[in-house]
Amino acid sequence: MSQSSLPIHAIFKDTLRFEWPNDQMLFVGMGCFWGVERLFWKHPLVKSTSVGYAGGIIEFPTYEQVCSGRTGHAEVVQLVFAQGEQALKEMLKLFWENHDPTQYHRQGPDIGSQYRSVIFTLEPNQMKSVEESLVIAKQALTKKGLGVPTTEILPFKNYYFAEDYHQQYLHKNPQGYCSLKGTGIQCVIG
């Protein structure tokens, strides 16, 4: 998808874009981005989502290039949500509870570095909150005997929108593939 001809979000009816000056953004990878996007677009504090590729070395990668494992990119969801620490904590709670952060470079049957567990932050206060949430998630995972999170927590580097057919895929294809599954932990953040 061309970065200059962005489509309209199928749920929020707004143009997909990079800039959201009055809102907060975070980029999360939790495996295949289709189910992750659906999880977040349903939350009342979320104002928009998009799926794309982040963290790698290739500019404007294609899905096929990302799937090769040679780009360094992860499949991620751009979250646009309300300002404030409580909204960020809500997003982090959804993140930790709805995938298995102990799986290295995979989520269930989806295997490869593009499916890794990752959070890209845009602001220093986000990094602090994400790191604090990691401690809480680690305690919950340990208590349940599930191992240590392999989640990468990194400052934002880059983001490229995925092709149009990937955007809001499970809205357009309600019976489509989704392997998103949590571990059953509960993260009380804040």
Image (spheres, rainbow, N blue to C red):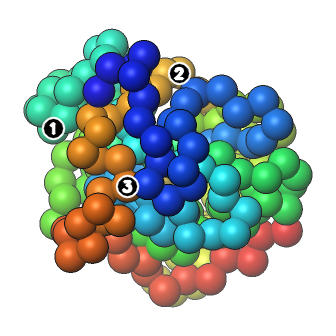
Q: For numbered disc 1, what is the local secondary structure?
A: helix
Residue 10 sits in which quadrant? bottom left
Residue 12 in the image: above or below residue 22: below
SS class of the residue under badge 3? loop
Vertical comparison of 22 with 71: above or below = below
Q: Position of residue 16 (x, y in %)?
A: 51, 36
In terms of image quadrants, where is residue 168? Answer: bottom left
Residue at the image position 69 percent from the left and 69 percent from the top: 44
Whole-percent x, y for residue 7 in the image: 41, 36
Mark whose residue sits in front, 3 or 2: 3
What's the CA distance linking mark 2 and mark 1? 19 Å
Q: Amino acid at mark 1?
A: Cys
Res. 96 in view: no
Residue 145 lies left or right of residue 175; in this view the side is: right
Residue 158 place in picture, x, y as percent: 49, 21
Looking at the rendered structure, the kind of residue marked 2 is Lys
Residue 159 point in image, percent of width and height: 46, 26
- The residue that label 3 is drawn on is 168
Q: Check if mark 2's residue and mark 1's residue have beta carbons within 8 Å.
A: no
Q: Quadrant of residue 95?
A: bottom right
The residue carrying mark 2 is 157
User: In terms of sequence position, does the residue under pointer 1 or pointer 3 come before the other?
Assistant: 1
Q: What's the CA distance linking mark 3 and mark 2?
A: 23 Å
Q: Nearer the viewer, residue 128 or 98?
A: 98
Which residue is depicted at the point 59% across and 50% down? Answer: 48
Quadrant position of the C terminus in the picture: bottom right
In this view of the protein, which residue sits in the foreground, 46 or 54?
46
| Dot 3 or dot 2, earlier in sequence | 2
* Foreground disc of the pair 1, 3: 3
- Seen in the picture, residue 92 relative to 124 is either above or below; the reply is below
- Image quadrant holding the N terminus, namely top left
Q: Which mark is residue 67?
A: 1
